[in-house]
């Protein structure tokens, strides 16, 4: 498929599709801070809409993020016209004549964003829309990072069900070690807030302080089955080693390419994390493309134990990890 993208920022969405064999023809971008990351991983930017088979976008997720959705009114979460980046992207998508339009957003969009999802369905003239709340474990990843993916099909498709996930049967540390191998892991603290040494003591000192949990630094036990989500404002430390994660460990967890010198950005970690987290995880984009988008584009009928909830021509499917198992020692 020929893919046109917009508002994919760090470029993870595009990288995952390229890993799956899709042909990326270019991206329409308007956020210059993201250029350094997308340039580093080789994403092409263009200045005009081109015809495509598939159009993808991940506009800002703040209105449907658990961290920031409280800043938005009910109207802002229900009215497509008030979501300017998504409306702009869908306008470009219509101009591209793409047969499939796919956008990603925060986890709360699955429930509280249905007004916008219905509005988008009508705006692009979709015959079928598939809405997934998917956890990265479906793609073999170790993060607890559910997100909402909305896929509009201009032709009718049939989804009877989706397959169950097989979560990684390996600890977080072993999973990351297997991907990084001998790559150097230099700790990269946010020097504005933390000291480089004694990470555990600093994290323990944060306990009890009033702030949003997703902003607090977190200890990762090397034997636990899942890590928390990589976010723009949260740092992790290995409990056993008493050290902060390196940039390459975050990149591995996000499934960004590991043959790239992120250190060449010469950025402190508090500037690198937003660039890594402001896009779709490449492994998730690859999984959804290979197992859902591509088969449906070929008129295959999808079936599996996860049955959709139907709302007219819109299918809602939850594809979440077993959160009770996140601290299992393997």
Image (cartoon, rainbow, N blue to C red):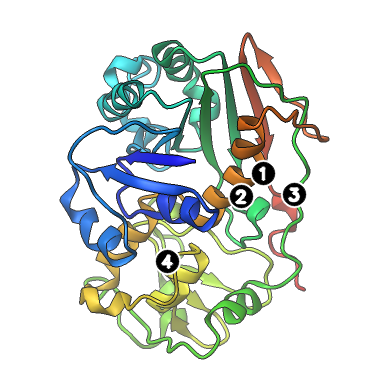
102 sits left or right of 26 in the view = right
Describe the element under mark 3 as helix, strand or loop: loop
Please tell me which residue lies in front, 26 or 105. 26
Which of the 4 quarters of the picture holds residue 277?
bottom left
Along the polypeptide, which appears first: circle 4 or circle 1? 4
Residue 168 visible somewhere in the drawing:
yes
Residue 162 in the image: x percent, y percent? 74, 35
Using the numbered discs, state the Cα–Cα distance from disc 4 to disc 1 in whole angstroms.
35 Å
Tell which tag, 1 or 3, sits nearer the viewer. 1
- Crowd band around label 2 with a 10 angstrom C-alpha radius: few (<14), some (14–19), many (20+): some
Quickly name the residue at label 2: 287
Along the polypeptide, which appears first: circle 4 or circle 2? 4
Please tell me which residue lies in front, 107 or 140. 140
Asked if the residue under mark 2 is in contact with the one under mark 1, i.e. CB atoms within 8 Å, the reply is yes
Quickly name the residue at label 1: 291
Q: Residue at x 47, y 20 (%)?
A: 117
Look at the image and tell me in which quarter the C terminus lies. bottom right
Using the numbered discs, state the Cα–Cα distance from disc 3 to disc 4 in whole angstroms.
29 Å
Residue 105 in the image: above or below residue 15: above
Q: Residue at x 49, y 23 (%)?
A: 112
- Crowd band around label 4 with a 10 angstrom C-alpha radius: few (<14), some (14–19), many (20+): many
């Amino acid at each position: 498929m020929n893919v046109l993208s917009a508002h994919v920022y760090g470029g993870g969405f595009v990288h995952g599709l390229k890993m799956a064999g899709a042909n990326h023809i270019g991206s329409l971008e308007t956020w210059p801070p993201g250029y350094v990351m997308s340039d580093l991983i080789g994403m092409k930017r263009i200045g005009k809409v081109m015809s495509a088979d598939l159009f993808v976008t991940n506009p800002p997720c703040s209105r449907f993020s658990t961290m920031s959705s409280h800043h938005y009114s009910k109207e802002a979460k229900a009215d497509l016209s008030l979501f300017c980046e998504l409306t702009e992207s869908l306008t470009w998508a219509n101009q591209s004549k793409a047969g499939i339009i796919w956008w990603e957003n925060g986890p709360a969009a699955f429930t509280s964003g249905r007004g916008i999802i219905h509005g988008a369905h009508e705006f692009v003239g979709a015959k079928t829309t598939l809405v997934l709340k998917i956890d990265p474990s479906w793609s073999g990843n170790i993060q607890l990072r559910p997100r909402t993916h909305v896929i509009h099909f201009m032709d009718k498709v049939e989804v009877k069900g989706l397959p169950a996930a097989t979560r990684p049967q390996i600890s977080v540390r072993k999973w990351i070690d297997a991907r990084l191998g001998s790559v150097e892991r230099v700790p990269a603290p946010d020097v504005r807030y933390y000291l480089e040494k004694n990470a555990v003591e600093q994290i323990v000192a944060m306990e009890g302080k009033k702030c949003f949990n997703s902003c607090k630094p977190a200890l990762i036990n090397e034997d636990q089955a899942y890590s928390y989500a990589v976010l723009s404002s949260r740092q992790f430390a290995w409990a056993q080693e008493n050290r902060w994660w390196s940039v390459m460990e975050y990149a591995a967890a996000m499934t960004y390419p590991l043959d790239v010198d992120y250190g060449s950005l010469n950025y402190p970690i508090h500037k690198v994390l937003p660039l890594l987290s402001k896009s779709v995880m490449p492994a998730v984009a690859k999984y959804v493309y290979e197992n859902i988008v591509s088969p449906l584009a070929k008129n295959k009928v999808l079936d599996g134990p996860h049955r959709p909830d139907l709302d007219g021509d819109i299918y809602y499917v939850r594809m979440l990890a077993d959160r009770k198992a996140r601290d299992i020692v393997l």
